Image: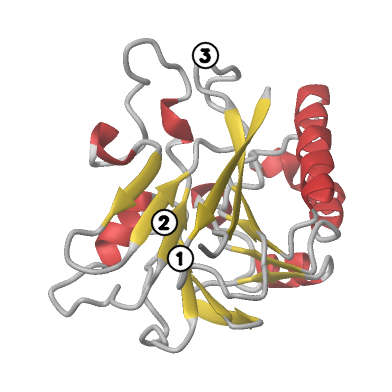
């Protein structure tokens, strides 16, 4: 089952003209029947929500033998919002034999911007997409614009910590969006140890930087691969919208 989690965020997190943002990560699409059913459910929700901006947090692909199925899911995702922006996860970055521009060209065919240490604007939102710290080298292309609503798209929460420094590089970053941990995926009292050097510290949900205005949300993800099932940890689509003015 896929749940839709909705958050209404006050300014300056979203621009004032009513932009609605969807975040989907870790689909691990294989093209098999279960994967197609999950994708159908996600696409249905995204179309129903009518979001303006769709952000994809990496690991949309599964293993190398499943790459041939990506055009199907990418073509459908690219139609779910006015603008769609994606980054690489560890599964994409692990395909070392592919040309450097493989992912850019593939995603571009389906009207999806693919960012690696780069920025793209949508209305007055600036999305900064960085590389995965496990398989690449993440770096901010430039400082966050204090006059923009800034979203950092990083595959895993460890990358956000990687980018944090005494120089306060995350200053003016309003929201960081991550996945990778699958929320632990199998939960009883706690989930299985998430794939993070910080263990359960950043397994799922909202986190606040103590020294600046940055919030980080870690999604439980939309699929599974290593363990082909979930227990007490549903897959999720996250929807962000502007809070109503008081």
Q: Nearer the viewer, residue 101 or 2?
A: 2
Q: Which residue is mark 3?
A: 231
Q: Mark 2 and mark 3: span between their CA atoms?
A: 28 Å
Q: Which residue is mark 2?
A: 135
Residue 95: x and y in percent read: 57, 54
- Nearer to us: label 3 or label 1: 3
On the question of residue 117 being in view, the answer is no
Q: How is the image coloured?
A: secondary structure
- Quarter of the image for residue 30 reads top right
Residue 197: x and y in percent read: 25, 41
Identified at 79% across, 62% down, the residue is 81
- Decide if residue 195 is on the left or right side of residue 240: left
Q: Which mark is residue 84?
A: none
- Decide if residue 230 is on the left or right side of residue 192: right
Which quarter of the figure is the N terminus placed in? top right
Sequence-wise, the earlier of marks 2 and 3 is 2
Q: Secondary structure at mark 1?
A: loop
Identified at 56% across, 54% down, the residue is 57
Furthest-left residue in this view: 166
Residue 8: x and y in percent read: 54, 53
- Nearer to us: label 2 or label 3: 3
Q: Are marks 3 and 1 in contact (CB under 8 Å)?
A: no
- Decide if residue 52 is on the left or right side of residue 244: right
Q: Nearer the viewer, residue 166 or 215?
A: 215
Q: Which residue is mark 1?
A: 131
Sequence-wise, the earlier of marks 3 and 1 is 1
- Nearer to us: label 2 or label 1: 1
């Amino acid at each position: 089952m896929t749940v839709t989690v909705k958050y209404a965020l006050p300014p300056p997190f979203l621009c004032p003209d009513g932009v609605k943002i969807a975040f989907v990560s870790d689909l691990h699409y294989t093209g098999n029947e279960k994967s197609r059913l999950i994708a159908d459910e996600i696409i249905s929700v995204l179309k129903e929500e009518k979001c303006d901006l769709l952000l994809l947090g990496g690991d949309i692909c599964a293993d190398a033998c499943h790459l041939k199925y990506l055009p199907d899911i990418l073509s459908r995702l690219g139609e779910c919002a006015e603008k769609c922006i994606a980054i690489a996860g560890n599964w994409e970055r692990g395909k070392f034999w592919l040309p450097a521009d493989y992912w850019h060209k593939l995603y571009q065919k389906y009207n999806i911007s693919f960012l690696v240490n780069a920025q793209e604007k949508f209305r007055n939102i600036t999305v900064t997409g960085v590389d995965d710290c496990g398989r690449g080298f993440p770096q901010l292309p430039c400082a966050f614009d204090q006059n923009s609503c800034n979203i950092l798209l990083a595959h895993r929460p460890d990358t956000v910590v990687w980018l944090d420094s005494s120089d306060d590089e995350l200053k003016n970053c309003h929201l960081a969006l991550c996945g990778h941990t699958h929320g632990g995926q199998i939960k009883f009292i706690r989930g299985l140890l998430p794939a993070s050097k910080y263990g359960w510290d950043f397994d799922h949900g909202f986190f606040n930087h103590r020294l600046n205005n940055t919030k980080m949300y870690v999604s439980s993800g939309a699929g599974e691969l290593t363990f082909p099932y979930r227990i007490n940890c549903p897959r999720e689509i996250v929807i962000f919208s502007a809070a109503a003015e008081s």
